[in-house]
């Protein structure tokens, strides 16, 4: 698996480019994951809000929630607004500082790997959006890593609390076909899951209640990000440098193409613990 130290270094490589850089082309909530557009003419703000509501609806009226890979805190902000208590995990000190500075009531953020997480109390729901694809290293036993994560989530959840998971996944391609540019320049030390690996890892621990394929949603999202970045290219170059901007424009173009071709997909999976316990 990707060790906590390797994961933290990879996160800093990608996310510590700077909050100001991402703010130029993300939506107002700073949500950096696949949106849920309602047609090609939807706005990015509305599509991201719809995605966040999907995951919050999945965990119902949970009053104590864990967000694994909380990013800049868009899920945490909404949980706070509805009066829930929430814990966010991130490996980016900059993101943790960003969320902490907002002072959301009932929210705490930890710069902590999920392997090291020890909750003070059980959670009613867990959300993880865009983190799962960074858990396993190329060439390792990915199912074992994912099963460890699911086992821990099951132990953290109270009763029939729900886990709502969103992740990019391999579709009509294998790890051997993955772009070296993406692996080295954008997401180092990470490997995508397949749906089969996720279901095998969850077997006996979680019942998969629903699976949504958002492949075309992510193509749309990447194209929206790319368009917004191009429109503010000069400002972005001043903030992060022209080489970073060129790298991100290439990454967003390749990602959109991969989703449209069916090489990679986007899975939204709602999981509920089996009532009669689980197998280790």
Image (cartoon, rainbow, N blue to C red):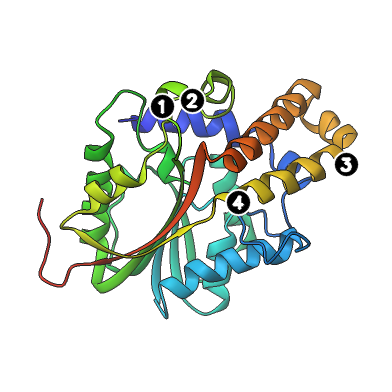
The kind of secondary structure element at disc 3 is helix
What's the mark number on residue 216?
Answer: 4
Q: Tell which circle, 3 or 4, labels the residue nearer the N-terminal end.
A: 4
Q: Which residue is mark 3?
A: 231
What secondary structure is marked by label 4?
A: helix
Picture layout, residue 214 above or below residue 228: below
- Please give the residue where the numbered disc 1 appears in the rendered image: 175
Q: Earlier in the sequence, mark 1 or mark 4?
A: 1
Residue drawn at (70%, 31%) of the image: 248
Q: Is residue 270 above or below residue 174?
A: below
Give the number of the mark in front: 4 or 2.
4
CA gap, disc 1 and disc 4: 21 Å
Residue at image coords 51%, 36%? 263
Element type at mark 1: helix
Within-10-Å neighbours for mark 3: few <14, some 14–19, many 20+ = few
Direction from residue 20 to residue 153 in the image, left or right:
left
How much space separates mark 2 and mark 1, taking CA atoms? 5 Å
> Left or right: where does residue 139 sit relative to residue 259?
left
Disc 3 from disc 2: Cα separation? 29 Å
- First of labels 3, 2 by sequence position: 2
Do labels 1 and 4 touch, CB within 8 Å? Answer: no
Q: CA distance from mark 3 to mark 1?
A: 33 Å
Tell me how far mark 4 sits from mark 2, CA to CA: 19 Å
Q: Which residue is mark 2?
A: 178
Q: Mark 4 or mark 2, which has the lower sequence index?
A: 2
Q: Nearer the viewer, mark 3 or mark 1?
A: 1
Q: Position of residue 239 (x, y in %)?
A: 80, 33
Cβ–Cβ below 8 Å for labels 2 and 1?
Answer: yes
Left or right of 185, for residue 110: left
Tell me the quarter of the image containing the N terminus: top left
Q: Position of residue 171 (x, y in %)?
A: 45, 40
Q: Nearer the viewer, residue 266 or 74?
A: 266
């Amino acid at each position: 698996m990707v060790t906590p130290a390797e994961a933290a270094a990879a996160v800093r490589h990608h996310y510590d480019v700077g909050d100001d850089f991402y703010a130029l082309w993300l939506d107002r909530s700073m949500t950096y994951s696949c949106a849920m557009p309602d047609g090609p003419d939807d706005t990015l703000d509305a599509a991201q809000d719809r995605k966040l509501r999907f995951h919050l609806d999945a965990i119902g009226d949970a009053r104590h929630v864990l967000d694994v890979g909380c990013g800049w805190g868009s899920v945490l902000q909404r949980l706070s607004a509805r009066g829930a208590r929430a814990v966010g995990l991130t490996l980016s000190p900059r993101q943790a500082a960003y969320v902490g500075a907002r002072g959301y009531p009932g929210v705490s953020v930890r710069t902590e790997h999920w392997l090291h997480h020890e909750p003070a109390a059980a959670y009613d729901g867990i959300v993880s959006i865009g983190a799962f694809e960074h858990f396993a290293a190329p060439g390792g036993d990915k199912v074992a890593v994912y099963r460890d994560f699911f086992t821990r989530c099951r132990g953290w959840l109270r009763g029939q609390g729900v886990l709502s998971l969103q992740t990019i996944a391999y579709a009509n391609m294998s790890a051997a076909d993955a772009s070296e540019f993406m692996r080295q320049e954008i997401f180092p030390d990470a490997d995508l899951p397949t749906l089969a690996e996720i279901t095998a890892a969850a077997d006996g621990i979680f019942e998969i209640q629903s699976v949504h394929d958002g492949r075309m949603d992510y193509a749309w999202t990447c194209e929206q990000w790319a368009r917004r970045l191009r429109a503010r290219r000069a400002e972005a170059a001043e903030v992060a440098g022209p080489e970073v901007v060129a790298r991100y424009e290439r990454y967003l173009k390749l990602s959109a193409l991969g989703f449209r071709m069916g090489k990679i997909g986007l899975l939204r999976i709602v999981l509920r613990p089996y009532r009669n316990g689980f197998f280790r």
